[in-house]
Image (cartoon, rainbow, N blue to C red):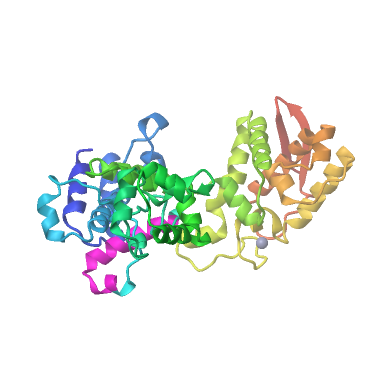
Amino acid sequence: MTILPKLIYLFNAIPIKLPKNYFIDLEKIIIRFIWKNKRSRISRELMKRNAGEGGLAIPDLKLYYKAAIIKTAWYWLRNRVVDQWNRLSMQDTVVSDYSNLLFHKPKDPSFWNKNALFEKNYWENWKKIWQKLGIDQNLTPYTTIKSKWVHDLDIKADTISTLREQGIVYLSDLWRTEELMTKQEIENITKNKIDNFDYIKLIRFCTNKANATQIRRKVENWERIFTTSLSGKGLISKIYRELSQTYKNTSHSPIDKWSKDMNAQFLDEEIKAIYSHMKKCSKSILIREMQIKTTLRYHIIPIRMANMTKQENDKCWRRCGKIGTLMHCWWSCEMILPFWSAIWNYVQRTTKMCIPFDPAVALLGLYPKEITQTGKGPTCTKIFIAALFVVAKNWKLRGCLSTGEWGIVVYECDGILFCYKK
Ligand SMILES: [Zn+2]
């Protein structure tokens, strides 16, 4: 895409806040171009993947804009003390260590309010990303010994410069494994006397519990980007990669959706069990379709339909009067609960086992240990899948779903099972 460098240049050169709609329109134009004015055939998320992963490597323009903004914010913040206009002319010739200015003490919030719109916009974006990553932007393992934090402690400039000369650049360098270096050790390294008072002040600052956790934590990739790149070359793509990773992690997996709807947290082994269950059962296409419907049929629940079609009615289609969430449609609707209890009776009669009345059993195939040990899990699974077929076939049925009309026959014929209408 040759349009991308042009857009990045634009984002970089004109530092204004762009509205959301701008990116939506841009994306629409691109999609119209790719699909030749027809509706897009694959989802946008898929198109954004790399070619190796079956995508078209469509760049996320909004993230690129964010990356451009963050790059500018980074320039701005690290050179804050140097006059902004002088810096413009010398930024390529003098590349010195400005990182002491980057992870700085927070500025008075009114400072940002008084400044021009675009600066505030940059600052807000910068702040938001750090919040999203859950790390403190002001005091980090990369906070230097020359930073304002230390400056405010009133430590002599001599002490700081001798420390820096001997490679103690960051506050995190002051540690030997678990313990802060003793005065003797520091003097051995620097081969210079350290002022006793300075040392005490440094120790007091660094071992303060709140500060120590910030300085001593694991270094994030995000911070490393800004500390290691001095000239800002390739910075936008680095930031973009990191951002897309961050935003990808928050994408919704079906399991997350289920755990949210069921109000339960699944353990790692349980998630494994769910996936293995899906894999085992998905030999037949018919059943696989069912699974896709159970786990992903999220978009045809009333609450989503109301959202999509901009209607007010998000009530359950079975007319029970409740709001039609995913969990409600599959399980907790009072029109469907009798059906499930009938199924439970049937299962318990056939397997002669007591099975907890739990949506995770029927919908996700998660059994308690006692049942998996007896090896009766697969039989139950077949009955439950047949029952799910019945629910899915009657997805929009008005009123009560009865077992009387539906017979469920479990017999195997290449792994296919049947439910039929009487
Ligand atoms: Zn209902």
Left of 28 or right of it: where is 216?
right
Q: Quadrant of the N terminus?
A: top left
Of 412 and 99, the residue lying toward us: 99
Of 208 and 125, the residue lying toward us: 208
* Residue ID at (21%, 47%): 96
State the image quarter where residue 382 is shown. top right
* Residue ID at (55%, 51%): 298
Range of the magenta residues?
111-132
Left of 35 or right of it: where is 8?
left
Give the image quadrant in which the ligand numbered 1 is located: bottom right
Q: Main secondary structure of the magenta part?
A: helix
Of 365 and 71, the residue lying toward us: 71
Q: Can residue 151 be seen in this view?
A: yes
Q: In this view, does 59 lie above or below 328?
A: above
State the image quarter where residue 104 is shown. bottom left
Of 239 and 50, the residue lying toward us: 239
Residue at the outermost top position = 414
Q: Does the magenta stretch include residue 114?
A: yes
Q: Does the magenta stretch include residue 273?
A: no
